[in-house]
Image (cartoon, helix red, strand yellow):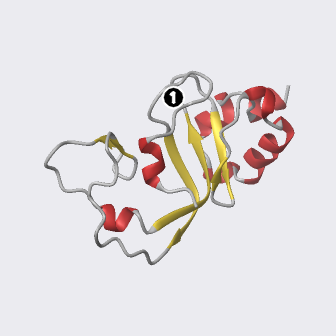
Amino acid sequence: MMRYWGLDVLKCVNCKSFPLELHPIEQEKQEIDTSGIEKPFCKVYCGYLKENIQPGKEYPCDECIRIGIKTGVLYCPNCKHWYPIKNGIAVILVDNKRKLNKDLEFLKTYRDRIPEYILKEGQPVNLESASK
């Protein structure tokens, strides 16, 4: 299951930019025992709070780790590439390995829950380019 802490390590496969933006569509709260795990879980970037990790700051890791993202979008603000999260798995593939018709179908299915700038300008496919 995709988790916010994944943003601490994931980079855009197109331009290698970091961090990616996460836009959850469907989330699931889960019971997870976090005792004995060093906090913060993230070392560089807290995707839950959308900020760089600051030494000495308390982070809501116990709350964050319980949220599984079943469906959503990862987005690179640098090159405008987006990547779907389906069934809890982030599908981060280079353009020539993607099934653009499936990506377009994903955008259409969740158009009311995806930011407009991704729908209109997202790469490698978006609803604007598909309608031309």
- Left or right position of 37 against 107: left
In which quadrant is the C terminus drawn? Answer: top right
Q: Residue at x 65, y 31 (%)?
A: 122
The residue sitting at 43% across, 52% down in the picture is 5
Report crowding for label 1: few under 14, some 14 to 19, many 20 or more residues within 10 A (C-alpha): some
Residue drawn 31% across and 44% down? 43
Seen in the picture, residue 128 relative to 38 is either above or below; the reply is above
> Which residue is identified by label 1?
77
Left or right: residue 24 versus residue 61 is right
Across and down, in percent, residue 42 comes to 34, 49
Q: Nearer the viewer, residue 81 or 130?
A: 81
Q: Viewer-proximal residue, 96 or 128? A: 96
- 84 left or right of 34? right
Q: Nearer the viewer, residue 83 or 31?
A: 31
Q: Is residue 54 left or right of residue 77?
A: left
Q: Quadrant of the N terminus?
A: bottom right
Q: Which is more toward the observer, 85 or 38? A: 38
Residue 19: give x, y in percent of width and height.
Answer: 44, 35
Rendering coords of residue 29 (x, y %): 49, 73
**Residue 70 figure quarter:** bottom right
Amino acid on which the number 1 mark rests in the picture = Pro
Give the total of numbered labels. 1
Instruction: Indicate the secondary structure of the residue bearing disc 1.
Output: loop
Quarter occupied by residue 116: top right
